[in-house]
Amino acid sequence: MTLPPLSLYGEARWSELVERVLARSWHVVASIDELPEEALVARTLLPGVLDEPLLLGRIDGGVRGWSAVCTHRAAVLEPHGEGARCPYHGRRFTGAGRCVTAPGFERPGETDHLRPVSIATLGPLVFAAIAPAMPFTALFPEERLAWLPALPVLSDPLGEASFEVDAHFLLYVENYLEGLHVPFVHPGLSAALDLGDYRVEPAGWSSLQLGVAREGGPSLHGPDGAIAAAWVGLFCTTMLNHYPWGLSVNIVEPLGAGRTRIRYRRWVRDPALLEQGAGGALEQVEREDGAIVARVQRGARSRLARPGRYAPRWEDGLRHFHQRLAELLETPEKMVASVGLEPTTPRL
Ligand code: FES
Ligand SMILES: [Fe+2]
């Protein structure tokens, strides 16, 4: 079976990927510790690409989100007090998205309240989707990960870091989804793994990869053995990396057809294990991945490049990802409607 055409990674298909894939997927938009009680927080979903202004708030113990676009003439709202206000003509909204003041009108109407967006939380992470083609429950394979220890809530004192790579976000994600490159690109990481027992388990809108620990290295107790790392790729911009010391999250932010920002944060359960095993030198591994995907990007632009074949077993997660991608690219309206979302508003 052949890999996708290399035109997928070019400028010509960029807007199609943005509208049909990114606009209909779930993305990490905040972490719980960034959301105070009784105030809304402004966030932008995929800045510069989707560029959707959102307001997030904690209500009744849960997180909710709204489009931060004013329901009058579309100015972007700003948080104010416990709610939000419009700097253009002064509309005000409560922390629950209700319009309470609408200058120029006798009273706010039913269509003046903020438009909700889909929100889901997973451990410390807050996900948002503006028109999801799949429910969040299809994204996270909870039953297959029940053996993992509870997600740690203590944030890494080093805080958030980010770096950019000269590559299409799909190339970065594809690289994440296969372990075939590990012995060639990551000699340090390879030393912590028993690569003969590397496992890939694609399912739903995710892919799980299990790296079995070398004898004596730090490990998690998996269903059938000592696991050095459990890498969980959630379609299509979130990577949850479970190590014996805790959780590292990669958030992929596409910036254009040849540039991608990766933000990452760590939540530490056992600081004593931080420098050890498969999760011990993450910056080094990231640098190695960034360099190799930039090299793929350059090759993919070649006029002489042709797609190759999937490596059996090793690239099962990659093939699964491409199947899901193709579903979104080929059946846009049907899939959005199937999860009960509003149809898009007709153009004027
Ligand atoms: S655009 Fe917000 S009140 Fe007019
Ligand atoms: Fe890698």
Image (cartoon, rainbow, N blue to C red):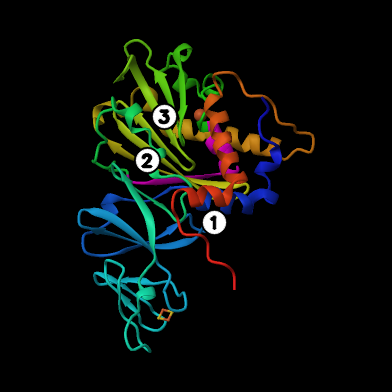
Q: Secondary structure at mark 1?
A: loop
Closer to the camera in the image, 32 or 264: 32
Closer to the camera in the image, 272 or 147: 147
Q: Quadrant of residue 57?
A: bottom left
Q: Quadrant of residue 192?
A: top left
Distance from the alpha carbon under mark 3 to that under mark 2: 18 Å
Residue at position x 26%, y 51% from top?
Answer: 33
Q: Amino acid at mark 3?
A: Trp
Q: Which residue is mark 1?
A: 49
* Left or right: where 196 falls relative to 137: right
Q: Position of residue 88 (x, y in %)?
A: 42, 81
Q: Which residue is mark 2?
A: 137
Q: Which residue is mark 3?
A: 231
Q: Secondary structure at mark 3?
A: strand
Q: Which residues are magenta?
A: 159-175
* Left or right: where 280 falls relative to 330: left
Q: Amino acid at mark 1?
A: Val
User: Dots 3 and 2: beta carbons under 8 Å?
Assistant: no
